[in-house]
């Protein structure tokens, strides 16, 4: 309010000569060194009016005010007092324009002794002070409650952050393991699917087979040739049998190898899909934990800001609240210790044999 009051006084001083053309202002100073900002004005009243005797232009406050239109209203309302009231009214208008209310002090009522009036005013001031103290105490209590709530919430939030970070670290480790496992499965599947048995023809066996067939054709051209080369024909037939048997065994082995590979490939694909689903679930959980941790950290930052603000504006209240919280904590520990120490034991019956 001091700045606003100084601005009002400055505006009043700048328009002083416009309202008072016969008061020549030569100095105006605003002082801020006391409880209320105030303005010092130095001016020279100058009147210019016809007179029977003396100078026409002279120094006269009454004449200057009279030329500005001020008139005396009687003994209790001289021309100077009338002018002062007009100036006060102008200042009051400037204050209202800036939203400042002018609270005028009451005067002693007629018939009421000055001592009693002062005593009454003092009582009213004390009552107002008591109301202000009650209000401040209520505000203090509310601030203490807020401090306790903020400390409790901050502690819970920090605990949640610690737990969330631990859980996030664990899930991150599981994610890395799942990634490695999935990579291994994919590599195994790719190896199994890209492996093919050597199905190329054995050109040596084929050549031997063709030679045997060709020789048999030559030996079986005529009956005379068959009779002459009976032993050779039987030998080539045995060779063909042996080659056919070897070819059939290789075919069965290739069929078994392909079936086994397809079966193993299906198993690898199923394992890969399972590992991928597991990884996706872990990643989803990891994402949820990251979002939850981000929210918790945001709340923690907000509570930390509130706590820092309370440290700045009400450090004493904060220390009192912290002391109360510590005292409650110690009281709970003492009660728990007492409960542990007090463990009633069942008295054994002596059956009167003491």
Image (cartoon, helix red, strand yellow):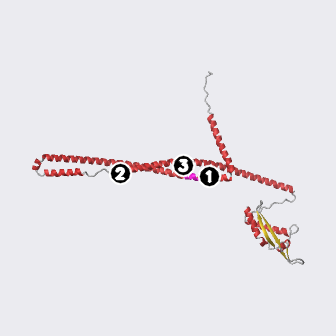
Q: Main secondary structure of the magenta part?
A: helix
Residue, disc 2: 193
Mark closest to the chain's N terminus, 3 or 1: 3
| Pointer 3 with pointer 1, Cβ within 8 A | no
Which label is found at residue 304? 1
Residue, disc 3: 165
Judge left or right: residue 196 versus residue 228.
right
Judge left or right: residue 213 versus residue 104.
left
Query: Could you say whether the residue bearing mark 1 is in a helix, strand or loop?
Result: helix
| Pointer 2 with pointer 3, Cβ within 8 A | no
**Residue located farthest toward the right when viewing the structure as drawn:** 53
Q: State the CA–CA distance, disc 1 to disc 2.
A: 58 Å
Neighbour tally class for label 2: few under 14, some 14-19, many 20 plus, Cα within 10 Å: some
Residue sitting at x 77%, y 66%: 29
Mark closest to the chain's N terminus, 1 or 2: 2
Residue sitting at x 63%, y 34%: 341
The region drawn magenta spans: 292-298
Quadrant that contains the N terminus: bottom right
Neighbour tally class for label 1: few under 14, some 14-19, many 20 plus, Cα within 10 Å: some
Residue 153: in magenta span: no
Tell me how many marks there are: 3
């Amino acid at each position: 309010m001091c700045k606003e009051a100084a601005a009002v006084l400055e505006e009043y001083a700048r328009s002083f000569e416009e309202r008072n053309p016969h008061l020549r202002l030569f100095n105006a100073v605003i002082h801020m060194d006391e409880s209320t900002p105030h303005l010092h004005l130095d001016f020279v009243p100058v009147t210019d009016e016809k007179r029977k005797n003396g100078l026409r232009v002279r120094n006269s406050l009454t004449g200057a005010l009279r030329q500005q239109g001020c008139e005396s209203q009687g003994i209790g309302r001289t021309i100077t007092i009338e002018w002062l009231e007009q100036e006060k009214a102008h200042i009051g208008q400037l204050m209202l324009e800036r939203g400042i209310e002018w609270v005028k002090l009451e005067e002693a009522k007629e018939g009421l002794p000055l001592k009693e009036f002062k005593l009454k005013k003092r009582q009213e001031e004390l009552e107002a002070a008591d109301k202000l103290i009650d209000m401040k105490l209520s505000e203090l209590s509310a601030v203490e409650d807020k401090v306790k709530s903020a400390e409790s919430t901050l502690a819970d939030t920090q605990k949640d952050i610690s737990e969330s970070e631990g859980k996030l670290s664990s899930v991150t480790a599981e994610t890395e393991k799942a990634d490695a496992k999935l990579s291994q499965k994919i590599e195994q599947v790719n190896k199994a699917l890209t492996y093919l048995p050597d199905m190329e023809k054995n050109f040596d066996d084929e050549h031997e087979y063709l030679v045997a067939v060709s020789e048999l054709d030559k030996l079986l051209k005529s009956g005379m040739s068959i009779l002459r080369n009976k032993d050779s024909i039987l030998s080539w037939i045995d060779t063909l049998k042996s080659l056919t048997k070897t070819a059939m065994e290789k075919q069965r082995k290739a069929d078994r190898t392909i079936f086994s590979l397809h079966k193993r490939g299906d198993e690898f694909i199923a394992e890969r899909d399972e590992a991928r689903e597991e990884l996706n679930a872990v990643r989803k959980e990891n994402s949820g934990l990251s979002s939850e941790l981000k929210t918790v950290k945001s709340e923690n930052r907000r509570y930390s800001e509130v706590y820092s603000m309370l440290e700045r504006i009400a450090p004493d209240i904060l220390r009192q609240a912290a002391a109360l919280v510590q005292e409650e904590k110690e009281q709970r520990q003492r009660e728990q210790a007492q409960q542990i120490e007090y463990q009633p034991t069942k008295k054994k019956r002596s059956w009167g044999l003491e």
